[in-house]
Image: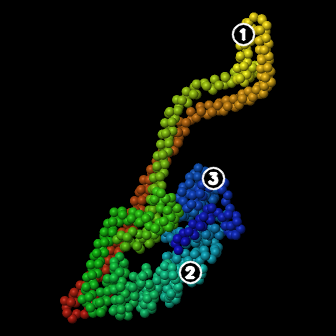
Amino acid sequence: MVRSACLCALAAVTLLAAAAPAAARLRDPEALPEVRIQDLPYGDVLFYYYQGKDFEAATRLLAYEHWQGLPHHQADAHLLLGGLYLSLGMYDRANRSFERLLTSDVPTGVRDRAWLYLAQALYARGQYAEAERDLTRISMRMSPQLESQKELLLANVWMHEGRFDQAAELLERWRGSQQGWTAYARLNLGIALVRGGRLAEAAPVLTSVGTMYALAPEMLALKDRANLALGLAYLQAKEPAQARVALDRVRLDGPFSSEALLAAGWAEAADGNYRAALTPWLALQARGAFDPAVEEADLTVPYAFVQLKAPGQAAQYYRTALRAYDDESAQIDAAIARIRGGSLLAQLLAHESDSAASGYIGNDPLDDDALPDRLSYGWFWQLGNVPDDPESHYLYTVFAGSDFQQGLRNYRDLKLMERMLGQWSTSMDAFQEMIVARRRAYAERAPKVDALLTSGELNTLQQRRAALADRLAQVQRTRDVAALATPAQAAQWGRVLRAQAMLARDPDTPAYAKLRERLALVRGVLLYQMDQQFAARLWSVHKELRSLDFELVRAQQGWASLQGGRQLLQAQTGGFAGRVSALQQRVGALQIRLAAAEQTQSRALADLAVQDLERQKKRLQGYRVQAQFALATLYDQAAHSGGESKAGAPQP
């Protein structure tokens, strides 16, 4: 039931933060409107949120708000942050966020569900007045299921505050659709009536719970609890016969069997049936130590033998009880010493991370290979298993208590934050190494950059471009077709010019005249070809010159950027290095504060466990005093033969 309530609360936070689509709004007029992601950082936050990584989502959300990266999602981000605070167990911040954000702009049904889930969280934390305050903020009736949860929660709050008549009045008119909720409500109603002194009205209510049909272990345990509560109420009202009827319905293998066996013996003893009382008490005594009911049975068994005029057997059982109390007291002392030594929390968390239950409820944040999810820390995490060591047997009730569970949850969250701060510290070291590598690369490349900037190569390229432009203009003006010839044509033209020069020096004979005519023909053909292709080649050269101008402009821009970067690079690196150093100092300071908080929380949990163990030891000492006094009385009576037994009844 606790896990399902947590998951319901998680669903509500999802509704508040991420909002329902427009299609859902058509079915539910109280759903939030559709939210379209307009800021990429908000999408990044939701990416982690929908994976159940609430801590990462909250961290990123706060960082993006600090850098003002959510201009279009301020209200959505604050609602989501309030839900994340709730899931992480930060109830005060969640409450402040909801008080500020759950205004009239939010649909009434959504507001009411938010207050209900926040009240559930506060109730689980033991803040009953605050839970009642948030329940009273619900302004209208909700769906039948949520309304029944609200009324049942309010009744439980009133019972914790001692307002049993109000709780009984509310529970009497309570109606629920689920069997589990109904059974719990009727059990609470019966207990409220008993505590209000209305046993006659409580009896049929508790009987209905104690005799209901059930198969689930939780419901079977609920039946046992109702029967035990009714039996104890009848015992206090001095109606042992009615008490026996209720106690006989408690299972012998259930979680309340020890208390039921002890009460059943007292029901028989109340009618003077001490021989019948020995049956449940001896069965209880055989169960071994580590149980307050068994410890009390160590006194009630010899007391019954005293009443049955069997002083020898009574003395034997009193001596056995004294040895048991001494052994158990020594074990409690050893358990206290181990707890003071700091082994309790390490064993609890190590056992929890190794258990099968940890795989069910989520990834273990203490495992570096697993990413944490919302069920592994914060409000939703619960201790599911305990190690099988001596102190655990004494501390089951402490482990199950809300104070210890809340403290252990906080301690586990501190360990999670310690691991995350360690990861962040490693990241800061990596950033510092990146800065060092960047400075090293800067030192190696800066001389080359300086040499390039002072070489004047860009001016040389520009001068060469200007010379090319002048030459092209001259070629175009004089129509120098040979200047734009292909390499093959240029080679042929060179041969023609060399041959023409040679023939110019030869005598004017018919043979040479014929050669000159042939050379003139070749020269004319070649000039004709180059002239025909001149216009196309001139256009192509102009195009290439324009491309060269474009590349020169890019080179000039790159040159200017290189000059500016050369001046700013050192300053930018220094600023980044300063930020990393400041973050390193913050992480280091947080690690120191976190270590102190861990020690404080560890001591507080150890004190809580030790206080309970000392209470148990004090109870054992009280039992031991009673056993010693009763045994001394038996010895005194034995010394005065014929004396009547006056050993008193044990005082629970």
**Disc 3, SS:** helix
Are the two marked residues, 2 and 1, in contact with CB atoms closer than 8 angstroms? no
Task: Name the side, left or right, on which 394 lies relative to 569.
Answer: left
Q: Position of residue 279 (x, y in %)?
A: 35, 89
Q: Residues within 10 Å of mark 3 (few under 14, many from 20)?
A: few
Does dot 2 land on a helix, a strand or a loop?
helix
Q: Residues within 10 Å of mark 2 (few under 14, many from 20)?
A: few
- Screen quadrant of the C terminus: bottom left
In which quadrant of the rendered view does residue 555 lie?
A: top right
Distance between the alpha carbons at the discs numbered 2 and 1: 122 Å
Q: Amino acid at mark 1?
A: Met
Q: Residue at x 50, y 41 (%)?
A: 435
* Res. 80 mark: none
User: What is the x, y in percent for residue 441?
Assistant: 51, 36
Mark 2 / mark 1, whichever is N-terminal: 2
Could you tell me how far apart the alpha carbons at marks 3 and 2 are, in whole angstroms?
46 Å
Q: Nearer the viewer, residue 443 or 625?
A: 443
Label 3 sits on residue = 40
What amino acid is labelled 3 in the image? Answer: Leu
- What residue do we see at 61% from left, 62% from top? 17
Disc 1/disc 3 C-alpha distance (Å): 80 Å
